[in-house]
Amino acid sequence: HRGLRGHRGRRGHRGLRGHRGLRGHRGLRGHGGLRGHRGLRGHRGLRGHRRRSHRWRQLLRRVPVPR
C-alpha cells in the first residue's frame, strides 16, 4: 500500500504503518470498510471522514461495498 504509507496529508499515524488490517485488502473486506476496524476507530486522521471518498474509491475498485 504505497499510497497510504508516504501520504502527505496523513502525518504522525504510526498505527497505520504496518497495520495488520491494511496490509492486504483481505483484512478490509471483512470489516465494513475501515469503519468498524479496531485499529482505525478513534484515529485522529480518520475521525473527520473527509478523505474517505478517496480511499473508498480505491477499495471499491476491487471489493464490493459492504454498506
Image (spheres, rainbow, N blue to C red):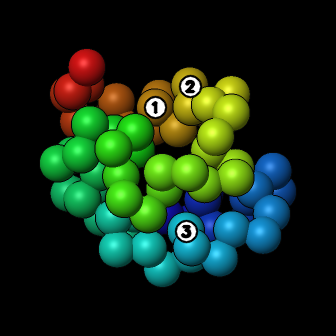
Q: Is residue 8 visible?
A: yes
In what element is the residue under mark 2?
helix
Pointer 2 with pointer 1, Cβ within 8 A:
yes
From the viewer's side, name the closer residue of 40 and 17.
40
The amino acid at mark 2 is Ser
Q: What is the number of the mark on residue 53? A: 2
Q: Which residue is mark 1?
A: 56
The quadrant in which the C terminus is found is top left
Q: Position of residue 45 (x, y in %)?
A: 70, 49
Q: Is residue 2 above or below residue 19?
A: above
Percent across and percent down for residue 11 are: 80, 63
Residue occupying image coordinates x 17% and y 48%: 30
Identify the amino acid type marked 1: Trp
Residue under the image location 48 percent in, 56 percent down: 40
Mark 3 residue type:
Leu
User: Mark 3 vs mark 2: which is more N-terminal?
Assistant: 3
Crowd tier of the residue under label 1, counting other residues whose Cα lies within 10 Å: few below 14, some 14–19, many 20 or above:
some
- The tag on residue 16 is 3
